[in-house]
Image: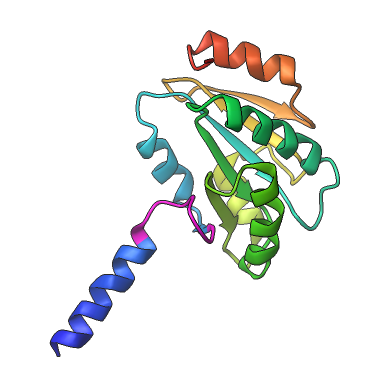
Amino acid sequence: MIRRLLLGMLAALVLAAPAGAGAPAGFTTDSLAKIKARYAGRPFILNLWSVNECSYCITELTLLGKLAKTQKRLPLVLVATDTPDYAAAMQKTLAPLGLGGVDSWVFDDPIPERLRHAIDPSWYGELPRTYLYDAQHQRETVVGVLSEQRLRAWLRKHKLAN
C-alpha cells in the first residue's frame, strides 16, 4: 500500500516537473496558461516548430541556440507541433544546437487544431511561428523565420540582452 502511494507520488512529481531537461512535456490545451504562470511578470519567447514538417525551423532554432549560448537569460519556450512519438528526434535536433536544456514541449492531443486554437485562434499551423511576450504577456506574432535583428532588439527592449 505504501509502495503504491510512493510510486503514485513519484509519478505525479515527474509529470509536474518543468520541461527542459530530458524529454519534452506534453502540450495540452491548458499548457500555455501554465507557461504564462511560470513567467508571471516576466517576458518570454514562445517558439513553435516541427522536427517533421518544417524545413525553415532549423534556421530559426540555430539562431535561438546561438543566442541561448551567449544570452544566459534567454527566456525561451519551445513547442513542437509534432506528436510525442517524435520526442527522441526532437532531442536529437535540439541538443547539437545548444537547446537541449531549454523548456521544451510537444503537442499531445489527437486533434492538433485544438492546441493551435488554444495558443492563437488565428493560427492555422504555418511554421515556424514565434510569439514574443512582454512582461504583461501582451504578444507580438512573428510568422516565418524570426530575424536576429528583431530578436536582439526585443531582448534589448526587455532588458534581457547580456
User: Relative to 14, is 73 on the left or the right?
Assistant: right
Please provide percent x and percent y for residue 113. 66, 54
Front position in the image: 3 or 130: 3
- Look at the picture and state if 16 lies above or below 131: below
Check residue 20 for magenta coloring.
yes
Residue 139 x %, y %: 56, 24
Q: Which residue is painted at 22% across and 86% down in the image? A: 4
Q: Is 64 placed left or right of 108 in the picture?
A: right
Asked whether, in this view, residue 76 is left or right of residue 66, the answer is left
Q: Residue furthest right?
A: 55
* Number of disc labels: 0
Which stretch did the figure color magenta?
16-24
Residue 34 lies in what quarter of the image? Answer: top left
Which residue appears at 61% of the width and 66% of the height? 84
Kindly give the residue lying farthest to the left in the view shown: 2
Image quadrant assignment for residue 59: top right
Q: Is residue 12 above or below residue 22?
A: below
Position of residue 50 measured from the top left corner of the image (x, y, whole percent)? 73, 51
Q: Residue at x 59, y 56 (%)?
A: 106
Please tell me which residue lies in front, 140 or 52. 52
Is 23 placed above or below 85 here?
above
Q: Is 50 covered by the magenta stretch?
A: no
Look at the image and tell me in which quarter the N terminus lies.
bottom left
Give the quarter of the image for residue 46. Answer: top right
Residue 161 x %, y %: 54, 15
Colouring scheme applied when the structure was drawn = rainbow
Q: Please name the predominant secondary structure of the magenta segment in the image.
A: loop
- What residue is drawn where x is 52% and y is 47%? 101
